[in-house]
Image (tube, rainbow, N blue to C red):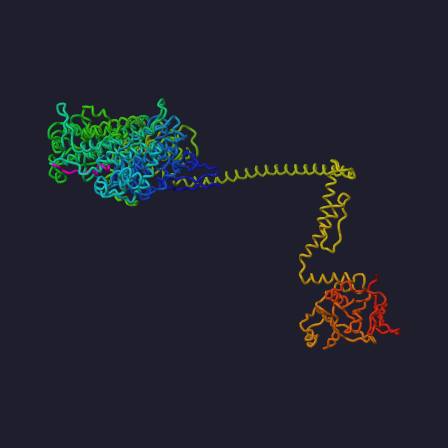
Amino acid sequence: MMELTIQLIPTGEIILSPGKNGEHYCHHCKVVASDGVRAMMESALTARDRVGVQDFVLLENYTSEAAFIENLRKRFKENLIYTYIGSVLVSVNPYKDLEIYTKNHMERYRGVNFYEVSPHIYAVADNSYRSMRTERKDQCILISGESGAGKTEASKKILQYYAVTCPASEQVQTIKDRLLQSNPVLEAFGNAKTLRNDNSSRFGKYMDIQFDFKGAPMGGHIINYLLEKSRVVHQNHGERNFHIFYQLIEGGEEDLLRRLGLERNPQQYQYLVKGNCPKVSSINDRTDWKVVRKALSVIGFNEDDVEELLNIIASVLHVGNVQYGSEDGNACITSDTQIKYLSRLLGVNGTVLTEALTHKKIIAKGEELMSPLNLEQASSARDALAKAVYGRTFTWLVNKINASLAYADDSYKNYSVIGLLDIYGFEVFQHNSFEQFCINYCNEKLQQLFIELTLKSEQEEYEAEGITWEPVQYFNNKIICDLVEEKFKGIISILDEECLRPGDASDITFLEKLEGTVGGHPHFVTHKLADAKTRKMMGRDEFRLLHYAGEVNYNVNGFLDKNNDLLFRNLKEVMCMSENKILNQCFDREELGDKKRPDTAATQFKASLAKLMEILMSKEPSYVRCMKPNDSKQAVRFDEVLIRHQVKYLGLMENLRVRRAGFAYRRRYEVFLQRYKSLCPDTWPNWQGKQAEGVATLVKHLGYKPEEYTGQTPGIQHQRTHKLGRSKIFIRFPKTLFSTEEALETRKHSIATKLQAGWRGYSQRSKYQKLRTAAIAIQAWWRGILARRRAQRRRQAADTIRRFIKGFIYRHKERCPENEYFLDYVRYSFLMKLHRNLPKNVLDKSWPTPPAALTEASEHLRKLCMQNMVWSYCKKISPEWKHQLEQKMIASEIFKDKKDNYPQSVPKLFVSTRLNGEDLNPKVLQALGTEKMKYAVPVTKYDRKGYKARPRQLLLTSSSAVIVEETKLKQRIDYGALKGISVSSLSDGLFVLHVPSDDNKQKGDVVLQSDHVIETLTKIAICADKIHSININQGSIKFTLAQGKEGIIDFTPGSELLVAKAKNGHLSVTAPRLNSR
């Protein structure tokens, strides 16, 4: 279930959490988006005590500068750096990275009404873009502020916004990339480190972004204004020259520097040491060099263009290192090393260049004369050359970028434009010169335009809504603009006249002429014209202008030289002869033939400013006012004095006063009604009539003072709280809006409860309906599957039975399609039965009866099974058990089916001996010596004469059988002399060892009896290797007595074992029969 939870994002905007379908809907605004609902700007009004108001127009005490600054401070403290003054965006540099410039933020501001989201640079960019698309009218965004306020960053953010959010194709992407990559190139060549800003733009820039009918960027054009060329040759302490010089020296490859004649040390170059600041902690020149090289490639510079451009940059450094000496008061170059470098890099004749740097060409009465220069003049000529070369190269660079941004199809003219003006703000330094004069003149013109356009747009809106326009009193700075630019009488005209007149003109004569011409102007003061108090704060070489933003003192020293900005003719001639293709374009040979004196710098700037005003007047403007919170670039410090200074010279209070001259708040009927309709029972939850009538009903219920549409007196008119126009409601006082917002906040709790209850009910019903529908669908699907499975099983069973019956009928025939299933089944059944009933061991002889077709295969399988079981059994037995089995096998081979008591011996294990060590006399063991005894058993020996039984021990060694009587070895029978062994077939234990009769050592055959006759005879057979010499007799055994006599043992079956001498002299043995054979 979705909860209507509120989140606060870094911009201060209030949004709703996403729904389950990825959509977000707010009942208080008509916006549905995929990344978060934009609540209206007024949603944050309830938090105004902590974060201030998002629009200065809503300040209750709008005339108080302290209240204005306090609102800025509150928002800055909460990292809310953007605030509106109506449609004007005020931006405070945070001096730290804020997570408010991501792609998600861009999407949040895309296509949204200006006031539906919190203030942001993206809102201004998107508003201009949508106005361009919907109204088909060109737009422009004017970004102003002093150095370090964040103007360049603001223009970057706008470009990035368009690059991400505008439609794209392969060609469009190329244009986007070039628009974005033009920034690092222009920053490298036009920006520098100053005391106030590490990346200060030292030129004004106006960029047109051209869009096709689909809204995709298709091209662009850049116009640059008043590059600070003097920085090339001079920097104040703690400042640097343009970035490109340091980037080249720090990041250039060794081979490149060698070709350019440069060293990796900026301290070696006069134009880079005057500021005494070669390194800056916040700038990585090596990394920036890589960025610039890549950007040049993206913009479309080939290797030749880059090489020629870098040759010029290096040549400027070499020009600065040209040193002069003095000969007879004339300047001369003391070393030709730099001249050689310059000759190669610029592609000019070294001798001609040397002469041009030390002489001036004068044309008098058609004749050309070369006049030598003194040291001061030569140094000025050198610096003028460096400034001219760098300034014209910068202009060429801008033109080159414009060529790469130009739309390829020249025939296509139906495009719309958004212009970006990133230009210096009002400047007031301790020492203000010609550059500050031009910059502040530019800001006066922009302020004049701003006031005119703001009042014009206000008046047009009032007239469109049918509301009487009330004239607004404001300071019209046209009087100051005329003081500067008026023809023949303005400061620029007087400056030009002083520069052009013959005679000994100087900066002081220019100041004197100003005093004589405009000395009576109320906005002009000099030391001579000022009162005693003012003189203490002014120098004798200064004049003061009372600008709209405050008073500024200008020092006239250098005004004439900077305004003339002349380059000696012979230096121009040398540059025109250059083989460098870029310089060839920068220095046109037609200049040499033009007898007309070129326009001064001030006149050129005035003309370009007039063109800029025409451009801006033809477009619908949007404004971004940039401010910096402190001079130390600290992230959390808010310098109120500095802020007050900027508020003044940016004209923000004047802007606010104009915006608040009428009504503080205005909204379209549908927006106002949609937001506040819940406060009136008649309009909640939906108003069915006209929007205007709904708003009238709502404001009447809220207790707004009733509006009378005709015949109002001015006094009464002032007290009205609101007016209803044709499509908008106008509210005069912010407190009226705040009280409405507070009522809405109170109402929200009850609305939220009802919404949550309704939503929970709807959500649960929807969930139940979905679960029920899903359950029915699953049940139907599953039943279908089960039914199809049953039907399929029945078909398969019927087919199987049919094939089985047919196979049974044809079972006795050769294999054919009719019986192959049956035969295969029979085989399979037999094999499965065999698998389940295989013999468990080698003694298990069971085996399933095979079908006729598998008889032979069954026999093979049976043999294989038996072999496998035997192999497995053999693999598992131990060496001791193996020896036991081997003895049992020999016993089986000898006695099986031949002797009655053999079966009883089978389960009994044979032992290694029947006598323990303590049963044998030590003397017997000593007599045996080293012979190893293999087996010992107690036996009974029958004498040869009377067959008297005597206990004896039979010992088997490796070579003989020994009969022992207590401690004596009575008889030793070598295995080689043993002729055989006889034993009866009955169950008695008697056996006869037959020995040769001619052996004198023996006294005849030996008759013995053993309780373990099978074991004993098996051991004798193994030790003597007489397995086949054991005779099993039935009835009687004959044996040899001493002296060749023969004895007989008769064996008869009986009930019990009896051994005795018979009357016939034989040994009679009666033994029970244990097994029938």
| Up-down relation of residue 547 to residue 851 (above or below) | above
Indicate the quadrant where residue 482 lies: top left
Say which of 156 and 737 sits in front.
156
Counting from the top left corner in percent of width and height, residue 440 is at: 22, 34
Residue 90 seen from this side = yes
Would residue 434 be counted in the magenta stretch? no
- 765 relative to 88 in the view: left or right: right
In the picture, which quadrant includes the C terminus?
bottom right
In the rendered image, which quarter is residue 135 located in?
top left
| Foreground pick, 384 / 493 | 384
Q: Give how far across and how far down residue 370 sits, in percent.
A: 14, 29
Q: Give left or right: position of 678 versus 184.
A: right
- State which region is magenta: 316-327
In the image, residue 418 above or below residue 765: above
Q: Vertically, is 314 above or below 1012?
A: above
Q: Position of residue 1028 (x, y in %)?
A: 77, 62
Task: Reply yes or no: does residue 318 show up in magenta.
Answer: yes
Q: Is residue 542 visible?
A: no
Q: Residue furthest right?
A: 1064
Relative placement, left or right, of 839 versus 1062 is left
Taking the spot 78% from the left edge, 72% from the top edge, the residue there is 999
Between 399 and 700, the one lying in front of the other is 399
